[in-house]
Image (cartoon, helix red, strand yellow):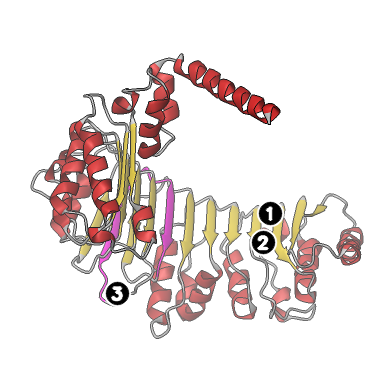
């Protein structure tokens, strides 16, 4: 018993020594350490040392999250816990000193009093907050104070809130570089354009599941914008608006959605990387396919392109529009993010004809298990110029060693004259079959020998 007590005493002394050591660090270092903790934990830590007693009143990062309240079946709207949470937030903000808030994150539910939440956000604005992250489960736009739209100190702004975002007459974001909007409803064309035009140094814009039903023309015009992400899932609005993107310094574009809103790209000559996912929408395949072709035209200068198998499937319905798919003269890296199947393999091969300088091809999900591809398949008579003369690296993931997969890899090895490396990643269910792995490797390496070139290296992972 005495030995156990002695051991515990040593642990306490060691902890005290650590606290004293940390307490001797400069304020800026202590603030940095505390910034990684939830605000509630920061306040708890303040009782461990006299030096820390008032440190929490100037910590640069505040993080308030009521998640634990609504994971239980208690009526949180009138619970003691919800009242305690509100009082805690207001106490922290009331006792805070005049120092700048670097980051203010607030996640809370609708049952809290709107004026109180509005005052919390206003307090962060008055403390010259640089990063503001709001996730509010409410449909009351009055929660967002008007002062937010005159946020001269804001560098990063993230709003997730299912309501109409009311844009005041005066909007000014002179320092805002990152803007994320989720679930918000845009009121009208003019106010929306005013919002984006006020972000004079904006570099990154993310729009997730935003409602454009009130808009006819949605213009994103920026001389500084570099990264743009638009996620239109999960709904399809048949009467979508026209999204016009004019950003001469845009380098990255990601789009996920049904193209219910038409997208027009202009003056995007700097665009080098894009990621596109367009699911099939039954009943509107033709319309979506035509819009997909138009979108691809705006991407013809990209160097890196990531497309889903669903996008390839979408192109099946383009019909004669396929002749209008642009050539991608600069494209050197292509990633396919979903399984290739019988219906999309032909479209995939045709798409490769539009990529004459492709050097790296990544099939990140491999083939559908129902894929049927044999040596006599007419599709394999087609050998795009990128395969025969440009392709240097092929990555094939989720490999099951099915006949179709082996046939495709042998086809590439046979015709790819400058191929340097083939990386094959086994699926988890097949990776333990060492004999099968050895047999497949021999079969593929034999193709290299018969071609009379040992330049290509095959790696199995």
Q: Determine the residue positioned at 76% across, 75% down.
A: 404
Q: Nearer the viewer, mark 3 or mark 2?
A: 3
Percent position (x, y) of residue 384?
66, 65
| Disc 3/disc 1 C-alpha distance (Å) | 41 Å
Tell me whether the residue at label 2 lies in contact with that at label 1, contact meaning CB atoms closer than 8 angstroms: yes
Q: Quadrant of residue 53?
A: top left
The residue nearer to you, when weighing 112 against 301, is 112
- In the rendered structure, which disc, 3 or 1, sits on the residue that comes first in sequence? 3
The answer to if 392 sits in the magenta stretch is no
The residue under label 2 is 385
- The residue at which mark 3 appears reads as 237
Who's the residue at 10% across and 49% down the image? 168
Question: In the rendered view, does 205 fall on the left or right side of 442?
Answer: left
Q: Residues within 10 Å of mark 2 (few under 14, many from 20)?
A: some
Residue 345, above or below 256? below
Tag 2's secondary structure? Answer: helix
Region in magenta:
239-257
- Which quarter shows the C terminus? bottom right
Q: Which residue is mark 1?
A: 390
Residue 336 x/y as whole percent: 59, 63
Look at 54% across and 21% down and name the residue there: 18
Query: Pointer 3 and pointer 1: residues touching (CB < 8 Å)?
Result: no
Q: Residues within 10 Å of mark 1 (few under 14, many from 20)?
A: many
């Amino acid at each position: 018993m005495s030995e156990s007590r002695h051991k515990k005493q040593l642990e306490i002394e060691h902890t005290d020594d650590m606290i004293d050591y940390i307490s001797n660090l400069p304020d800026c270092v202590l603030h940095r350490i505390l910034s990684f903790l939830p605000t509630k934990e920061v306040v708890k830590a303040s009782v461990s040392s006299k030096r820390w007693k008032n440190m929490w009143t100037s910590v640069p990062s505040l993080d308030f999250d009521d998640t634990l309240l609504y994971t239980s079946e208690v009526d949180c709207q009138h619970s003691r816990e919800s009242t305690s949470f509100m009082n805690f937030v207001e106490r922290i903000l009331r006792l805070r000193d005049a120092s700048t808030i670097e980051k203010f994150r607030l996640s809370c539910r609708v049952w809290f009093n709107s004026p109180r939440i509005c005052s919390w956000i206003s307090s962060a604005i008055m403390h010259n907050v640089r990063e503001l992250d709001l996730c509010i489960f409410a449909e009351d736009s009055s929660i967002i104070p008007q002062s937010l739209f005159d946020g001269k100190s804001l560098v990063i702004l993230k709003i997730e809130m299912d309501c109409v975002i009311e844009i005041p007459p005066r909007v000014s974001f002179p320092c805002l570089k990152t803007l994320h909007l989720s679930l918000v409803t845009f009121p009208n064309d003019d106010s929306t354009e005013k919002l984006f035009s006020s972000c004079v140094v904006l570099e990154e814009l993310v729009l997730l599941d935003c409602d454009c039903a009130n808009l006819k023309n949605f213009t994103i015009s920026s001389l500084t914008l570099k990264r743009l992400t638009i996620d239109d899932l999960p709904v399809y609005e048949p009467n979508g608006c026209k999204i016009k993107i004019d950003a001469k310094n845009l380098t990255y574009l990601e789009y996920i959605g049904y193209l219910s809103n038409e997208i027009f790209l202009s003056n995007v000559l700097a665009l080098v990387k894009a990621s596109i996912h367009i699911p099939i929408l039954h009943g509107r395949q033709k319309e979506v396919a035509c819009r997909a072709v138009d979108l691809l035209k705006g991407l013809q200068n990209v160097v890196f392109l990531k497309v889903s198998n669903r996008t390839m499937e979408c192109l099946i319905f383009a019909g004669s529009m396929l002749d209008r798919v642009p050539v991608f003269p600069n494209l050197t890296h292509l990633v396919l993010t979903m399984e290739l199947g019988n219906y999309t393999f032909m479209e995939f091969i045709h798409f490769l004809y539009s990529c004459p300088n492709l050097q790296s091809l990544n099939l990140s999900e491999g083939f559908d298990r129902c894929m049927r591809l044999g040596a006599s398949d007419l599709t394999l008579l087609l050998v795009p110029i990128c395969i025969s003369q440009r392709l240097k690296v092929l990555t094939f993931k989720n490999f099951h060693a099915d006949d179709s997969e082996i046939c495709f890899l042998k086809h590439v090895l046979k015709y790819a004259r400058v191929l340097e490396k083939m990386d094959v990643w086994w699926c988890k269910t097949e990776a333990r079959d060492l004999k099968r792995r050895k047999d497949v490797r021999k079969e593929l390496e034999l193709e290299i020998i018969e071609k009379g070139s040992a330049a290509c290296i095959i790696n199995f992972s």
